[in-house]
Amino acid sequence: MLSTLRAENPKLADQFIAPIIPQWLEAYVVILNHHVQDDPKCATEEYGLKMKVVKCICTISSEFPKYISPNLPALFEPIWMDLYNLRERYVTEFISDSDEVGESYADSDGNEIGFQNLLYVLFDFVAAACSKKTVRHLFVEENTTTPFFEQLLYVYIIYMQITQEQVEMWSMDANQFVADEEDGTYTFNARVASIDVLLSLQEAFPIPFFRALTGAVQRHIAESNELRMAGSSDWWKIQEACLLAVGRLSEELTEALNDPTKDVTFDLKSLFDHVVLEDMKAAEFPFLQGRAFVFASEFAKILPTEMASQYVSVAVHALQAATSGIPVKISALRALNNYCKYLNPEYIYNYQVNIMEGTCLLLENATEESLMLLLDTLGSAIKINQEVTAKYEHILTAGILQVWQKYATDSIITSYVLDLFEELAKNNFYYPSLCRTALPFIRQVFTTPNTSPIVQSSGIDLLTAMVSFGPSPLPNEFTEQMFPELMQLVWNTHDMDLLQSGQECLKTLISKDCDHLMQWHDGSGKPALDYIVHFVARLLEPTGTDSEALFVGELIVTLIQKAGHRIAPVLPDLLTAVLGRLLNTDSQPFIQSLVMIFAHLVISQQETVFNYLCNTEISGKSGLEILMTTWCDNYDSFSGYYTLKVSAIALSKIYLVNDPRLFSIQVKGEIVVNPNAGIVTRSRAKKNPDQYTAIPVAAKIVKLLIADTTNTLIAEQTHVEDAESIGDDEEGGDWEEVEDDDHFGRNDINFLSDMLANIDDDDEEDNPELKNDPIYQTDMKAYLTDFLKNCHGHDINQFQSITNCLNDEEKETLAYILK
């Protein structure tokens, strides 16, 4: 309520808040310091009250930070004491192998109340509050770590221990073990929450954190060894938690140790020599043994030479040993995956075969999360030595295809299989055998009656991977066997995924082996080009959906670029069909796909395509009017690093055409603002859509290209400002007072568009042919600046008159360019 009031009237809210918050905080301290004795039910009810108090403190801190920051030390103390005092109960009820379980109750809203739920709230408070200046002295004094900081980490490591319930569950369920122990797990428990707090503490105190962690870990290791000598059955759990704590921060620790300016000391060598090596031999404690495997691999990048091969050997043996249980095998897989990715190949080369064989043996019975881990590890192993990988094609391809066949409708599993296929297709030694085994398999998927479209679409994706990463030209089987089956499949379906996968595959096939494809014809003499044109024409039919034909633009562009003069007889009809679809669609991605066909043609065959557009009429409009209206209206919505360059360069070339048929076209200009419109509801907006001024297309092109230039200048300046702003916020966190901003600036929009464009950029980065394209390499800031200067200097197509149509921001950009 106060927060709402503050949003409406900040001064009035402060008048209410300032007098009462100190009273609240005083009451909160009393509640937090109180502890019910000898009455479990009342104690649990008190936990519920404390939970609400801590949540309220967090809310006040978020909404009114200036009123609570000075009081954080007083609040921190009782919260810390609860964390410290509850650790023994937590160990007794959850960690130890005992039947003692504390009670929990539900409040009036049905929310569970128990001391574990209180812990989560206390963890949240510590994670958020630790970075505040007013509590910094609790952690660091005169650049020295405080005893409290070490004690805090000591306690959190206790909460990180594996519970008895987890031991029982993970021993039986490999998938649950994999899912719960992933870095980005969706599981939430005290172990996961404690790791989150450690990450927050390390971020708040990068250098002091590791000093405190050293002391906490050394103390726990010494105490666990004493427990071991005393015959305790749970001694191993705290050692496992210590390795988890250090290992989860391996990247930050490694970076700190490699930076002399940070002056971080952490005796990793002693930890490896006296703890990790011993724990790797602790077969009677599989979770500890497994954690030792994973821990060593997390420091693969800095492992000493004499230790690297030894650790890999131990993990391989554990993976293959018949006596290894689920925890050990899963941990060995994790470790080997890390070794394959981060260790120098010379230390793992001798074990590549063992890793591949070990993972393949487990594929048949693995499911879900454990299967993903196996496939990911296999994907890392096959990269070590391509020649060795090729010798085991008979095992690898069969095993991978068997997994695909079993999980062909599971998009996540098939994505892992697809990654493997791409990697195997890159292997020149492996590729011939892959074709012999996989192509007949995929062909059968295409031709088997009543096969699910989802399965067939996934099968096309496998074929696309083999085409994309195979040699050029491709083996004959792709054109002579796979192409006709692919075309028959996509001709006779209306399934969106199947059609989209088919377009992508066909585009890739044309790009990779067009000459071979153009020479092929079926038994009746019908050439491949007829097959392709028939498919494209069907996609462009007015009755089709935009989603079904989403990639047809890229397919046509590739066909034009690769087939050249061979497509000339049918190209006008295809372009007419494209214009027809442009006239009847409002799907932006589809519009972009179709407009790019003409953009490429403008760049490569400007005069020919311009004349075609002027001489073509559909529904009373010229092709040029249809194209320019659609292009200009949607220009700002296009995305993709390469696409944006093609669009801008093509538009600039159109502007240079001195033809009255172009300059007579009117397109949307600025939006017309109605000052009397009031609040525009959704229904009112539908009845009264936005109105725009009409301006000549030449003026619109200039405005769009100036906007592009503005964006390049802002992006350049933003990079400089971002670099200068790093580290400016000393406090960080969520509790700082910030100024409200009711609007997005242009920089925000540019940043978002850059993020969205990166989705397309990922594919572009994998396309060497595209990256060698002169357009891809064009410096757009230089290109647009030169274009605008040239147009202004020579008054091309009455450029100086067009500047009268510019708004103030556009005029400012142009003036900046021309100065």
Image (cartoon, rainbow, N blue to C red):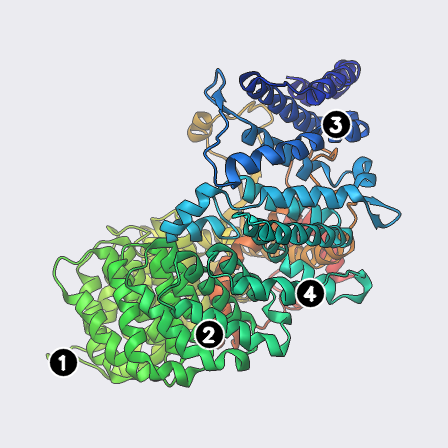
Tell me which numbered mark, 2 or 3, is placed earlier along the sequence: 3
Residue picked out by circle 4:
270
**Vertical placement of 85 versus 409: above or below?**
above
* Residue type, label 1: Gly
Residue picked out by circle 3:
75
* Residue type, label 3: Leu
Residue neighbourhood size for the residue with mark 3, other residues' Cα within 10 Å, grouped as few (<14), some (14–19), many (≥20):
many
Query: Looking at the picture, how far across and down is residue 695, in whole percent?
Result: 55, 47
Residue picked out by circle 2:
604
Residue picked out by circle 1:
525
Q: Which residue extends farthest right?
A: 142
* Residue type, label 2: Ser
Rendered residue at 55%/23% (across/down)? 679
Q: Which residue extends farthest front?
A: 230
Query: Looking at the picture, how far across and down is residue 564, in whole percent?
Result: 36, 79
> In whole angstroms, how far apart are the C-alphas of marks 2 and 4?
66 Å
Nearest the viewer among 463 and 781 is: 463
**Disc nearest the viewer among 1 and 4:** 4
Q: Quadrant of the C terminus?
A: bottom right
